[in-house]
Amino acid sequence: MTNEAKLQHTVSAPKAKKRKIASLDKKKARAGWVFVLPFIIGFLLVYLPIIWDSIYMTFHSISIVDGGGIDLLPVGFENYSDALTEDPHFVQTLLTGMKELLFDVPAILIFSLFMAVLLNQKMVGRAVFRAIFFIPVILSTGIMESIAGANMLGTMMEGSGSIDGSQQSAASEIVSVMDIEKLFYSMKIGQGLVEYVAKMINEIYDIVNRSGVQMLIFLAGLQSISPAIYEACRIDGCTAWETFWKITFPMISPMILVNGIYTIIDSFTTDSNSVMRYIRSVYDKGTEGQVLSSAMAWMYFIIVMLMLAAAAGLFSAFVFYQRRD
């Protein structure tokens, strides 16, 4: 075979197709979609129609038809207007819920981070202490949550007659604002901060009950920090205070973002939330209460989403992500 024939044969030969190999990130992404596929299917088939019906009802009023059944009459935004202007308690309850949120989120984050740092230290019985602080999370579910929400213990104490109202009120507070003022008098701390600290101490039971999940997330973040970084800090002569603010706090700042979002959602949806209780009470008032409570619930949902967006933007501005180049 001549050189020209060999060259022609080489040119005319079909090229072998290169097989595309998926990267590891793409494989993980596909596996992630497989895991969330049952939720997506369930959401589209079950929850999405329910959500649509709930939104649809907020723009209608319900009238009972003779012989059974109901009829929906379009009323536009009347239910939303009635919730904001006609109902005397909804807006006030909503503002009270916002104030509770502004207290709950910082208190829970500070306490859970403080306890996570302590429980991350090397000590005897560390696993036992971690379990003890997570037990309230288990006990606060199901029937225990219902008992706490109904405040049965307080009702029993009031009915026993052994403690009068004034003594019970004094006994229910661990500290008072006056005690905190005496402690912080020489520090020149403002009255608002004093009241906040006093309220945090008096509500320590509720804070501990709602801090278990956040502790676990903070512990996971603390254990992901390389011990070599702390060893380098000790060699350089850094104090524990400097190590916390320069190393620990920036490294777990993504966990602060996660816990902040989780705490906001948990505070807005818990059974003890005043807004949720009020919306449920309006729903129990009959057919008109059902559409009115639906309008309240969707307004509440929009406010929650706006609060989450604001919190995510605020926390994200201070989040530090470690490069793994």
Image (cartoon, rainbow, N blue to C red):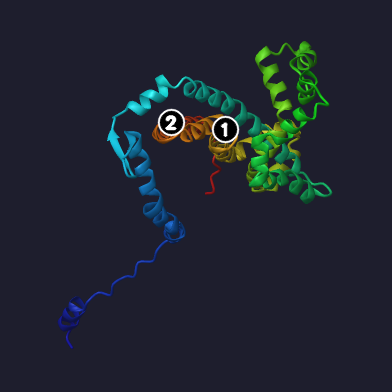
Residue for point 32% across, 28% down: 77
**2 and 1 marks in contact (CB < 8 Å):** no
Percent position of residue 263, x then y: 58, 37
Q: Which residue is mark 2?
A: 296
**Left-right relation of 140 to 24:** right
Q: Which sits in the foreground, 196 or 218?
A: 196
Residue for point 38% across, 44% down: 51
Residue for point 70% across, 41% down: 116
Say how many tags the image has.
Answer: 2
Placement of 218 over or under 278, stated as above or below: below
Percent position of residue 16, x then y: 28, 75
Mark 2 burial class by Cα count in 10 Å: few <14, some 14-19, many 20+:
many
Q: Which sits in the foreground, 179 or 156?
A: 156
Whether residue 238 is visible here, answered yes or no, is no
Q: Quadrant of residue 320?
A: top right
Q: Quadrant of residue 322?
A: top right
Query: In which quadrant is the N terminus drawn?
Result: bottom left
Q: Amino acid at mark 1?
A: Asn
Whether residue 11 is visible here, answered yes or no, is yes
**Left-right relation of 66 to 233:** left
Q: Dot 1 lies on which element?
A: loop
Q: What is the CA distance from the residue labelled 2 to the residue labelled 1?
A: 14 Å
Percent position of residue 86, x then y: 41, 20
Residue for point 73% across, 37% down: 236
Badge number at residue 273: 1
Q: Quadrant of residue 156?
A: top right
Q: Earlier in the sequence, mark 2 or mark 1?
A: 1
Q: Amino acid at mark 2?
A: Met
Q: Dot 2 lies on which element?
A: helix
Badge number at residue 22: none
Which residue is the extreme one toward the bottom? 1
Percent position of residue 239, x then y: 76, 32
